[in-house]
Amino acid sequence: ARVFGEARVSGEARVFGAARVSPTFISGWRWTVTVSDDTMAIGCQHHTIDDWREFNDAEIEEMDSDALEFWQQHKPAIFAIIDARKTA
């Protein structure tokens, strides 16, 4: 991973491997969402994007008592952003 220009790193930012695209951050929701090339973190849950796509409701619900409601509300927007990153 490389950082250029006036980039700032703060909070609990994490960079893994050979990142190719700048991470995308979504804040202002119950949990912050961080999307990198192949992984996504929602709050403290960090998994591959493929895993997030495959998680069922029971698996999401096990993550936190509020997770399923959050996921059902924000999943379409999150994946729209992820899909848009692929065409950028």
Image (tube, rainbow, N blue to C red):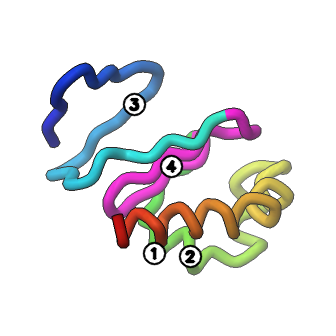
The span from disc 3 to disc 1 (Cα, nearest Å) is 21 Å
CB of mark 1 within 8 Å of CB of mark 2?
yes
Of the image marks 3 and 1, the number of the one nearer the N terminus:
3
Of the image marks 4 and 1, the number of the one nearer the N terminus:
4
> Residue at image x 35%, y 36%?
14
Could you say which is closer to the camera, residue 70 or residue 60? Answer: 70
Of the image marks 2 and 3, the number of the one nearer the N terminus:
3
SS state under label 1:
helix
User: Residue 88 magenta-drawn?
Assistant: no
Of the image marks 4 and 3, the number of the one nearer the N terminus:
3
- How dense is the environment of label 4, judged by Cα within 10 Å: few (below 14), some, or many (20 and up)? some
Residue at the disc numbered 3: 13
> Residue at image x 74%, y 61%?
71
CB of mark 2 within 8 Å of CB of mark 3?
no
- The amino acid type, in three-letter code, at marker 4 is Ala
The span from disc 1 to disc 2 (Cα, nearest Å) is 5 Å
- The amino acid type, in three-letter code, at marker 2 is Arg
In which quarter of the view is residue 5 placed? top left
* Disc sitting over residue 50 in the figure: 1
> Residue at image x 62%, y 74%?
55
* Disc sitting over residue 53 in the figure: 2
Residue at the disc numbered 4: 41
